[in-house]
Amino acid sequence: MKKIYLFIALLFCSIQVSFGQTYQPTQEILQAREKFNDYRFGIFLHWGIYSMFAQGEWYMTNKQLDCEEYAKVANAFYPHQFNANEWVEAIKEAGARYICFTSRHHDGFSMWDTQASDYNIMNTPFKRDVIKELADACHNQDLALHLYYSHIDWTRPDYPRGRTGQRTCKNLQPDWNNYYRFMNEQLTELLTNYGKIGAIWFDGWWDHDEDSIPFDWQLDKQYALIHQLQPSCLVGNNHHQTPFEGEDIQIFERDVPGENKAGLSGQSISRLPLETCQTMNGMWGYKVEDQNYKSTNELIRLLARTAGKGANLLLNIGPQPDGQLPETALNRLSEIGQWLKLHGESIYGTDAGEFKQGEDIVTTKKDNLVYVHILTDSIKEVKIPMKDKVKNLYKLDDKSVIQYKQKDDTLTFSTNIPSGTADQVIVIELKKKK
Ligand code: GLC
């Protein structure tokens, strides 16, 4: 009888698999996901003509501006200090492994030489294809390039408005088919003319999350187009939901997976590679009064806590209208980089560790090594449940050996952490299992 039940259960599962799972990631995608999962640290760049208003990337809608009035700044956009190589150098020095750049944000302005719309960077006095320059710099310096792409457009009349940008356009003429064609034409350009793109990062799905009739974004066809154009390009969507079919990464906005402190990320955690995006100050796009930067120690702790959940941290910077990265952001990058030079081994290519003690201690692991990240300098003694036999215990930065006791499946050791330390990393080397 038991066997019959088992047979029926298995049959049911396989029917579900064959009917429900249409997306079969290719070998290339699986490899790309693994590579992405090893990165652990990337830099998000929110840059567009909105930087000229210096009020963040939502300025048009927050102030209910007319999109045609807003668009007039395009005719003055001349970020003469922009130097893609310098950006990439600073970001590499920080120890980041990838960039995610806003190719077109909700305001609808395209930062590349697109044939699909005149509202683009080539029609500003600057006349330089920023994505081309960034792509070349990334490819030359071996930094992966991901592109953010907004599903929303507050300027085009054909985008069927959702709950944002209701008043930005005078003559709305919703035409989903036309708009969908336009987006796919742009995505085709981005994935054809700029070399290897590591991921497309969508945003805006939530614009229609209150529709009485569920909005059909036709994502499956769009995702398939991306995978067809670049077979190792990952797809992510900042929809704040459990991943949909066809997606390769799961995104958490302003939250370490599972914490949902910002109230945007209550979704369950999938088995896809995870990414947390967070701002360095308060806003994504450049906002002149937003000087409330998180300290370097806070950012390093955030990176460790994200890695402790097995997720990447995509840390945002909003470049200035002159094309430079803000000075405070550059300082943060350099200090994070110095920390990662000594401690990178405990972040890159690690998995989430099993042990965690509130926000004070998190762990990551790799092979027979467990990295204990102590995120507050007041901890004097650490007790960790540990069944496996410990071979050695040492501080990661200077490799100095630490005395320990292992008894009743508990590992105990003392610490003496200099005040102001961001993250004291202790390495537990386990005896290799035969
Ligand atoms: C939100 C905001 C958007 C920002 C994104 C980054 O979706 O609408 O402006 O680009 O978060 O995570």
Image: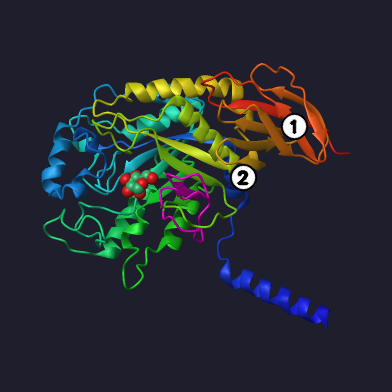
User: Could you say which is closer to the camera, residue 274 or residue 136?
Assistant: 274
Q: Quadrant of the N terminus?
A: bottom right
Mark nearer the viewer, 2 or 1: 1
Secondary structure under the numbered disc 2 in the rendered image: helix
Figure check: 196 above or below 140: below
- Residue, x 37% and y 67% (percent of image)? 216
Q: Quadrant of the C terminus?
A: top right
User: Could you say which is closer to the camera, residue 70 or residue 365?
Assistant: 365
> Is 262 within the magenta?
yes
Label 1 crowding class (10 Å Cα cut-off): few <14, some 14-19, many 20+? some
Horizontal side of residue 246 vs 391, given as left or right: left
Of pointers 2 and 1, the one earlier in the residue sequence: 2
Horizontal side of residue 125 vs 390, given as left or right: left
| Predominant secondary structure, magenta span | loop
Residue 24, x across and y down, in percent: 59, 59
Residue 299, x across and y down, in percent: 46, 31
Colour style of the rendered protein structure: rainbow
Does label 2 point to a residue whose CB lies under 8 Å from ligand 1? no
Observer able to see residue 50: yes
Residue 230, x across and y down, in percent: 49, 47
Instruction: Kindly identify which residue carries mark 1.
Output: 412
- Residue, x 31% and y 58% (percent of image)? 207
Does label 1 point to a residue whose CB lies under 8 Å from ligand 1? no
Label for residue 31? Answer: 2
The amino acid sitting under disc 1 is Thr
Q: Over which residues does the magenta segment extend?
A: 239-263
Observer able to see residue 368: no
What is the CA distance from the residue labelled 2 to the residue labelled 1?
38 Å
Horizontal side of residue 229 vs 305, given as left or right: left
> Is 296 within the magenta?
no
- Residue, x 31% and y 30% (percent of image)? 319
